[in-house]
Amino acid sequence: MAFQDQTIKCKDCGTDFVWTAEEQEFYQQKGFNAPQRCKDCRAKARANFNDRNGGGGPRQSYPIKCSNCGKDDTVPFQPRGDRPVLCRDCFRKSKGE
């Protein structure tokens, strides 16, 4: 399928922007929908989303004792106590890394 550059009107600021044939091919390969915002408005929307959802800041860490090896470590979630919690090394080994 041959793609051609398309002009799209940004739903936020109303300016026209070009959605290139290369971008269209990439979007199709990834299964993405066509963009509705220009690059500037997408960047603003992404920044607003990150601000609202705590993105970019330091993560909360919780101290644990590994259920497998007994080593002290931290994890980025609060353990509930109903499941074993692994240190980074044991977690990587369990995933085959």
Image (cartoon, rainbow, N blue to C red):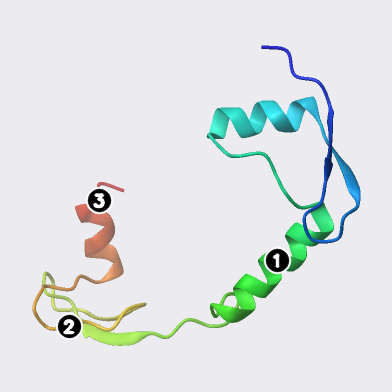
- Whole-percent x and y of residue 66? 17, 76
Residue 58 at x, y percent in the picture: 54, 83
Horizontal side of residue 4 vs 49, given as left or right: right
At 18% from the left edge and 73% from the top edge, which residue is drawn? 85
Q: CA distance from mark 2 to mark 3?
A: 21 Å
**Nearer to us in this view, 7 or 27:** 7
Whole-percent x, y for residue 27 in the image? 63, 34
The residue tagged with tag 3: helix, strand or loop? loop
What SS does tag 1 mark? helix
Q: CA distance from mark 1 to mark 3?
A: 34 Å
Q: Nearer the viewer, mark 2 or mark 3?
A: 2
Res. 12 image quadrant:
bottom right
Q: Would you place residue 15 above or below residue 24 in this image?
A: below
Question: Marks 1 and 3: CB-CB under 8 Å?
Answer: no
Q: Residue furthest left?
A: 82
Q: Are marks 2 and 1 in contact (CB under 8 Å)?
A: no
Residue pictured at 11% horizontal, 69% vertical: 68
Nearer the observer: mark 2 or 1; the answer is 1
Q: Would you say 71 lies left or right of 54 here?
A: left
Callout 2 amino acid: Arg
